[in-house]
Image: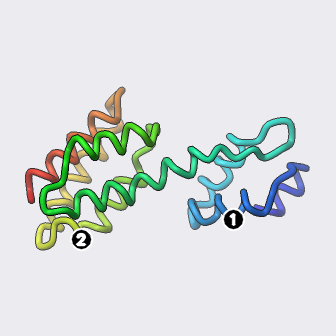
Amino acid sequence: LLKILDQENIKHTDEDIINIVNQFYPDLRKCINTIQANTVDSQLKLDKSVLFSSNYVDKVINELGKDKPSFKQIRQIIADANTDDYEELFRELFDSASEYLPGKEGTVAGLVNDHQYKANFRIDKEINVMSLINNIINNK
């Protein structure tokens, strides 16, 4: 990433690069896309909300891990994240299934697969994600 920034003459701080790498590595495409989207007049101006939007995934998993997860609370977490890219959430829901729905990992895999497929055909992807969350909660 540093080599690309130097070749493109983009000014940046070490802190911004560390934040991007910590948030998105090993997905180099996402790292590069984040840099492109946050570069103005050859200066990297990292929007901290970009980093927050990925942080919401941990909050969703934590809420699902509770004995009685709150659909409303998860809805608010996702709304506050202000994102329309839920691939990271889908992946984490699949990877962490044993933490919030032990013994039903196969059910989670099927639900995530179904909703990930449907996301390709939905205009409002947030509704699709919340449908997935509702199905997960109903399987507790």
Q: Crowding near pointer 1: few (<14 within 10 Å), some, many (20+)?
A: few
- 98 vs 12, left or right, is left
Labels 1 and 2 touching (C-beta < 8 A) = no
- Residue at 21%, 66% in the rendered image: 100
* Image quarter (top left, top right, bottom left or bottom right) of the C terminus: bottom left
Q: The residue under label 1 is which amino acid type?
A: Ile
Find disc 1 in the rendering and name its residue.
18
> Residue 137 at x, y = what percent?
14, 52
Label 1 vs 2, first from the N-terminus: 1
> Residue 20 at x, y = what percent?
64, 58
* Image quarter (top left, top right, bottom left or bottom right) of the N terminus: bottom right
Q: The residue under label 2 is which amino acid type?
A: Glu
- Residue at 25%, 53% in the rendered image: 112
In this view, 120 is above or below 90: above
> Residue 10 at x, y = what percent?
86, 49
Name the element at disc 2: helix
Find disc 2 in the rendering and name its residue.
99
- Out of 112 and 140, give the one closest to the viewer: 140
- Out of 93 and 77, give the one closest to the viewer: 77
Q: CA distance from mark 1 to mark 2?
A: 28 Å
Q: Crowding near pointer 2: few (<14 within 10 Å), some, many (20+)?
A: some
